[in-house]
Amino acid sequence: MANVEIYTSPSCGYCHAAKRLLTQKGVGFVETDVSRDAAQKQVMMRRANGRRTVPQIFIDGNHVGGYDDLNALDRAGKLDPMLAG
């Protein structure tokens, strides 16, 4: 199984949608709340090539993007092989 990391904030609907999609697929993930942690937000932005919005999702250390990107990978049939590791 792939190592999945997701940077979130509690009030973000797209974050909840991304976590729901991953959970439906039976995938565990490490969640980092950046809403009150400026240092973690800086880490996220550096890893996500300057993207400031949440969620930012990483699979096996590779930046996938946000929820729309994750959902597009799923619709294209590319997400499951990535999650399989």
Image (tube, rainbow, N blue to C red):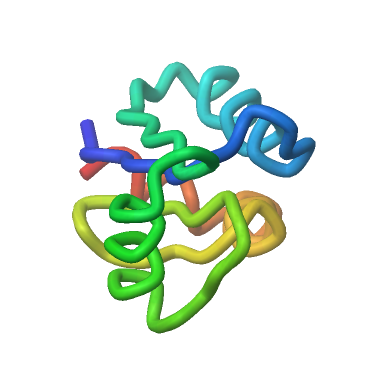
Is 49 drawn above or below residue 77 in the view shown?
A: below
Residue at the (50%, 58%) spot, across then down? 78
Expressed as whole percent of the image width and height from the top left, the position of residue 2 reads 23, 39
Of all residues shown, which one is farthest toward the right? 13
Expressed as whole percent of the image width and height from the top left, the position of residue 55 reads 57, 50
Question: 47 left or right of 65?
Answer: left
Residue at the (71%, 34%) spot, across then down? 17
The residue nearer to you, when weighing 77 against 24, is 24
Disc count in the image?
Answer: 0
Residue at the (59%, 19%) spot, across then down? 24
Q: Quadrant of the C terminus?
A: top left
- Which image quadrant for residue 80? top left
Q: Quadrant of the N terminus?
A: top left
Is 3 drawn above or below residue 53 in the view shown?
A: above
- Which image quadrant for residue 84? top left
Of all residues shown, which one is farthest toward the bottom? 49
Residue at the (28%, 62%) spot, across then down? 43
Is 50 drawn above or below residue 79 in the view shown?
A: below
Question: 7 left or right of 60?
Answer: right
Expressed as whole percent of the image width and height from the top left, the position of residue 79 reads 48, 50
